[in-house]
């Protein structure tokens, strides 16, 4: 009231103020509700869950970034479904622009990626992203497909030591490139240069890397759980992320079946066009207008 805010929007889980007419909060996922063992907090997520519950009670409207996240909210927090609006994330137009061959060569040199084909993974050592099982599957794949590189982007903070040990134990040192964090521009180039993008996450509220890869024209393999089938539609090859052998077989099939790869590329590009920040903004504005009525 002091600031004369008609509608206040907390864009990431919390409401730091209240609007005179109403308040909107965006919930991106319930990852630590689903996987409390991955919490960074020594005492767990009890306090965070309590705060989120209070926030959801105070909010006039709740934006969930997928139907799956909306369902999770209603199931876990007993949020009335009529209070929730699903608004998908978007993707920047730059991901649809084909990069030059020079820029693709430059990004490979920048991260010391050896010549030849590579599979891309995004997510670092976050245990929810399932890199350890992907490494196991990649080790199986290498027995049939050579030469091949796995490029891993993202930080190696949490469980990084275990990742390094697994790479060493599986003798993958010459076949895995760890880039660390990369800029959004370099990420787009890494997508574009990949033969295949694999995203075996155990849980996502949305899964932006899936549509980023699709927009860059890369065949996508992803998990058949949480929001990922909803977001990817019919444009990805789905796997059980807990099944290492199935993951290896899926990678081998997409790499060896040119018709399948081309089909996934075409369908993925069309699927990615369904997501835009302009659409998300328009739908968010409509939620604000609901609060003003």
Image (cartoon, rainbow, N blue to C red):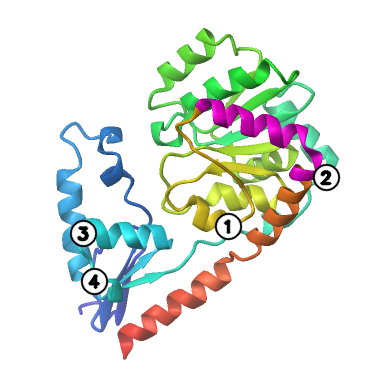
> In the figure, 91 relative to 203: above or below?
below
Task: Please say whether residue 185 is one of the residues in the magenta stretch.
Answer: no
Mark 1–mark 2 CB contact (< 8 Å) = no
Nearest to viewer (mark 3 / mark 1): 1
Label 2's element? loop
Please tell me which of labels 4 and 2 falls first in the chain: 4
Toward which corner of the image does residue 275 lie, by quadrant? bottom right
Question: In the rendered image, which residue does mark 3 sit on?
Answer: 77
* Eye-nearest disc, 2 or 3: 3
For the point 40% across and 36% down, which residue is it? 128
Q: Which residue is mark 2?
A: 100
Is 255 colored magenta in this rendering?
yes
Residue at (74% x, 38% y) in the render? 193
Q: Which residues are magenta?
A: 244-260
Q: Main secondary structure of the magenta part?
A: helix
Question: Label 2 crowding class (10 Å Cα cut-off): few <14, some 14-19, many 20+?
Answer: few
């Amino acid at each position: 009231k002091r600031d004369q805010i008609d509608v206040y929007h907390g864009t990431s889980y919390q409401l730091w103020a209240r609007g005179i007419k109403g308040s909107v909060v965006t919930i991106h996922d319930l990852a630590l509700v689903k996987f409390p063992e991955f919490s960074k907090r020594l005492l767990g997520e009890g306090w965070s869950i309590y705060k989120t519950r209070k926030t959801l009670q105070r909010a006039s409207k709740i934006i969930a970034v997928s139907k799956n996240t909306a369902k999770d909210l209603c199931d876990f927090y007993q949020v009335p479904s009529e209070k929730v609006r699903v608004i998908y994330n978007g993707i920047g137009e730059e991901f649809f622009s084909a990069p030059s061959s020079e820029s693709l060569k430059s990004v490979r040199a920048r991260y010391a990626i050896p010549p030849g084909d590579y599979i891309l993974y995004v997510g670092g050592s976050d245990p929810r992203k399932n890199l350890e099982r992907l490494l196991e599957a990649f080790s199986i794949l290498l027995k049939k497909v050579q030469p091949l590189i796995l490029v891993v982007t993202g930080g190696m903070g949490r469980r990084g030591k275990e990742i390094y040990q697994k790479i060493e134990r599986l003798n993958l040192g010459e076949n895995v490139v760890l880039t660390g964090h990369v800029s959004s521009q370099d990420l787009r180039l890494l997508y574009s240069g990949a033969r295949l993008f694999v995203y075996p996450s155990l849980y996502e509220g949305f899964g932006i890397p899936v549509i980023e890869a699709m927009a860059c024209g890369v065949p996508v393999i992803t998990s058949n759980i949480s929001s990922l089938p909803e977001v990817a539609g019919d444009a990805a090859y789905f796997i059980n992320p807990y099944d290492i052998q199935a993951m290896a077989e899926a990678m081998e099939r997409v790499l060896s079946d040119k018709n399948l790869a081309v089909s996934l590329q075409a369908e993925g590009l069309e699927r990615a066009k369904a997501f835009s920040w302009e659409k998300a903004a328009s739908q968010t504005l409509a939620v604000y207008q609901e609060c003003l009525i």
